[in-house]
Image (spheres, coloured by chain):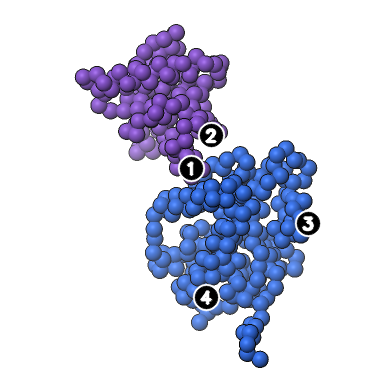
Chain colours: A blue, B purple
């Protein structure tokens, strides 16, 4: 049953009345120790850490969507932009009490950015120097950079910065991807800028790859 | 001198001693974590040496019949034209502030300064990438920036 409440009000109502709260500091410190443990386990290979965080987020997202739908009682979104608004105003509000802005909608409507003014996950964090993205480099989508064989996001500066930077909150990209995949939308979500690297804002780019059709399970002809 | 606070509940702004020469942080095994010389003072081994000496004075105070009852240890020693003040947390992390003897200061100012150092150290600890068990010296631009605020002139502090 779809509601006609504006998304912002819906998000706030669900956050206030239906969500159990935990201590923010406890959550943030736990996440921080997960990331540092991964960094140690993978021996400072930040590309693998990013990938692992994204995978963890994907597993969380595929389960989280059920709670989202049950508590928000949201109906279908008319287009991808509205999907972005729902993620921002209802989804992130419910689970993190955070409302990013939907921005930079592409001309074909298949991609948008979520811009976070603040990122509670990174509240206490100071990244080691080799984990940061060097200033002046441009981030390309992970799918395209792997195709070019990692010729990489360094536009004109090598200076020992050839390794991938660490995207500390990469778990959130995985959550977005996992949730949307359960809604039959295959997307790619990746960070474009991060305050921990010295940028002004945190920006996540979400791009629709394709709409998934229900497939016939193997074995049923 | 101090501007009137905007809200009734705001406590008067603390003043820090002007002209701090050096702030040092020493770990529980007397391993130096940070020896930061303020602007206008040369970074040289003198401050490292003085930190070690100060650790000895701290140990002496702890063994004395009347050990300090709170974190602030007061003036530990005066060496080479510098007054060295000490502060130790419950976890045996020691902070030292070194002031030239020409600077006149009060205990309350030093206590405020030590509280700033303590808060900055706590923020360092909450950074998940910092390993508190490591004996190496600390490289944290954020920590150094916080300590730099102690050297701001009094006019800026009263904002």
Chain for numbered disc 1? B
The span from disc 4 to disc 1 (Cα, nearest Å) is 38 Å
Q: Secondary structure at mark 2?
A: loop
Q: Secondary structure at mark 3?
A: loop
Tell me, yes or no, whether dots 3 and 2 are on the same chain: no
Pointer 3 residue: A148
Q: Earlier in the sequence, mark 4 or mark 3?
A: 4
Pointer 4 residue: A74
Q: Where does the image place residue B106, in percent across and percent down from the top left?
A: 35, 18
Chain for numbered disc 4? A
Pointer 2 residue: B140
The quadrant holding residue A113 is: bottom right
Query: In which quadrant will I find the C terminus of chain A?
Result: bottom right
Chain for numbered disc 3? A
Tell me, yes or no, whether dots 1 and 2 are on the same chain: yes
Pointer 1 residue: B127
- Observer-nearest residue: A179 or A56? A56
């Amino acid at each position: 049953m779809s509601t006609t409440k504006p998304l912002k009000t819906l998000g706030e109502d669900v956050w206030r009345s239906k969500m159990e709260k935990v201590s923010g500091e406890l959550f943030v410190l736990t996440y921080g120790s997960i990331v540092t443990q991964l960094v140690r386990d993978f021996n400072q290979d930040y590309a693998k850490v990013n990938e692992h965080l994204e995978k963890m987020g994907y597993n969380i997202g595929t389960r989280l969507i059920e709670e989202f739908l049950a508590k928000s009682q949201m109906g279908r979104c008319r287009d991808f932009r509205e999907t972005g608004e729902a993620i921002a105003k209802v989804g992130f509000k419910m689970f993190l009490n955070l409302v990013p802005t939907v921005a930079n909608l592409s001309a074909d409507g298949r991609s948008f950015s979520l811009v976070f003014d603040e990122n509670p996950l990174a509240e206490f964090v100071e990244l080691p120097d080799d984990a940061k993205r060097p200033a002046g480099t441009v981030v390309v989508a992970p799918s395209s950079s792997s195709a070019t064989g990692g010729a990489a996001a360094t536009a004109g500066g090598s200076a020992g910065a050839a390794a991938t930077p660490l995207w500390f909150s990469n778990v959130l990209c995985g959550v977005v991807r996992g949730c949307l995949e359960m809604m039959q939308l295959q997307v790619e979500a990746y960070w474009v800028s991060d305050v921990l690297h010295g940028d002004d804002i945190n920006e996540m780019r979400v791009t629709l790859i394709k709409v998934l059709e229900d497939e016939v399970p193997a074995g049923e002809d | 001198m101090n501007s009137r606070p905007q809200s009734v509940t705001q406590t008067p702004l603390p003043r820090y001693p002007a002209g701090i020469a050096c702030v040092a942080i020493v770990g529980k095994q007397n391993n130096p974590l940070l020896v930061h010389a303020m602007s206008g003072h040369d970074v040289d081994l003198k401050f490292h040496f003085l930190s070690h000496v100060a650790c000895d004075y701290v140990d002496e105070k702890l063994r004395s019949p009347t050990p300090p009852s709170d974190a602030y240890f007061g003036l530990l020693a005066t060496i080479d034209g510098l007054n060295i003040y000490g502060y130790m947390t419950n976890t045996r992390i020691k902070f030292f502030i070194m002031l030239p003897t020409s600077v006149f200061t009060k205990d309350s100012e030093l206590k405020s300064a030590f509280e700033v150092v303590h808060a900055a150290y706590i923020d360092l600890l909450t950074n998940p990438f910092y390993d508190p068990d490591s004996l190496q010296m600390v490289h944290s631009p954020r920590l150094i920036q916080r300590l730099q605020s102690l050297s701001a002139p009094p006019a800026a502090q009263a904002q």
